[in-house]
Image (cartoon, rainbow, N blue to C red):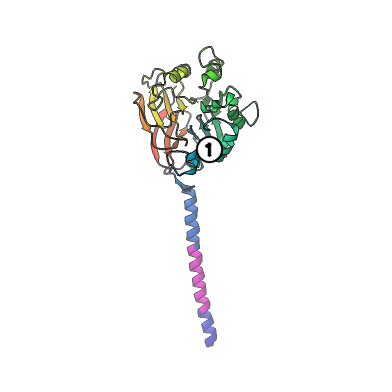
Amino acid sequence: MNKNQKGLAVFEGLLFLMLVGILGFAGRQVYQSQEKTNTIYDNVVISEPREDYSLTRIVAAGDVACDPGSIYLNVNDPSHCQSKATAALFASLKPDAILALGDLQYEDGDFDKFKASYDKDWGIYKSKTYPAAGNHEYNTPWASGYFSYFNEGQTSGRAGENRKGYYSLDIGEWRIIALNSNCQEVGGCGENSDQYKWLKQNLTENQSSCTLAFWHHPHFSSGRYANDKASAQLSAPFWELLSQHKADVVLNGHDHLYERFSTLNTDGTPSAAGIRQFTVGTGGKSLYKQTAKNPGSERMIDDRFGVLSLDLSGEAYKWQFVATGGEILDSGTGQCNT
């Protein structure tokens, strides 16, 4: 081998080593990037990502999207208009269903406002969403925009039958029941109302292992509506029927905070065989402060937006309140009533 050939061989050897180093570094970078993809979604880090797909996961919140004309949409105010941040949590929580707990579009349920605001964030997950109507939806007559949006112009659909808004479905081993607490808009909620009779028949025929019901106005509260006895009285027939049929969980919105209660009877008396209420009015619109202390309240969070995640089995449930940013601020487990 002459001098020129030796020089060429050395050069080729150095070039080979450089290529190996570059490819190795690139490989490590690709691997690291893939690891991040599994744990970070839209800059939201979830400390406990979903692992067990044998359980059914439901995610819920209410009081969601600001009016398209809100001044808070044009400023970075962490206490208002955070529906984009709460919707970002869905990508990592990977729910099987989303329960939207009313007042989904402010300041009224106009169809064009739904399209301009709610639809841009939570609307991405519309095919997994089951809603309940809130009072702001009825700031548009008959909540027509709400029903048009979710039922897509049909007489019934994801929001139930138009002008009624109560319906049920089975998810996993659970019966899920949506009720309309805007009682004056649907002919009442008492024993003589069509809604009450429908609920009674539904519960009588229910063969599911566990039962969850959701509507907008909370029966119990330590927030702004702690002294709203009218709403509590209107929902009392729901609680009585649900208690008689050993329901397990109730979800509400309306108060813009998160509150978890112990298992309670209709009158608020703690009972191991009672129903556990979660108020999750933290979907993004704004936040309210605690104004009282309900005796049955176990956990209150009034300064963070977020969603409630429920993992459901045939005999129990696990809850987590996941705040925007990914922190789990409340968690626990409960057994179904049998």
Magenta stretch, residue numbers: 11-25
Residue 245 visible, this orientation: no
Residue projecting furthest to the top: 192
Residue 331: give x, y in percent of width and height.
39, 35
Q: Please tell me whether residue 174 belongs to the stretch shown in magenta.
A: no
Q: How many labels does the image show?
A: 1
Q: Is mark 1 on a helix, strand or loop?
A: loop
State the residue at coordinates (60%, 27%).
Answer: 144
- Mark 1 Cα-neighbour bin, 10 Å: few <14, some 14–19, many ≥20: few
Residue 338: give x, y in percent of width and height.
44, 22
Vertical placement of 281 versus 43: above or below?
above
Residue projecting furthest to the bottom: 2
Residue 150 visible, this orientation: yes
State the residue at coordinates (50%, 61%).
Answer: 27
Three-letter residue code for mark 1: Gly
Residue 68: give x, y in percent of width and height.
54, 38
Q: Mark 1 points at which residue?
A: 69
Vertical placement of 231 versus 100: above or below?
above
Figure quadrant of the N terminus: bottom right
State the residue at coordinates (52%, 24%).
Answer: 208
State the residue at coordinates (49%, 39%).
Answer: 71
Q: In which quarter of the image is residue 159?
A: top right
Vertical placement of 141 versus 285: above or below?
above
| Dominant secondary structure of the residues highlighted in magenta in the image | helix
Residue 302: give x, y in percent of width and height.
38, 34
Q: In which quarter of the image is residue 255?
A: top left
- In-front residue for pair 206/72: 72
Q: Quadrant of residue 327?
A: top left
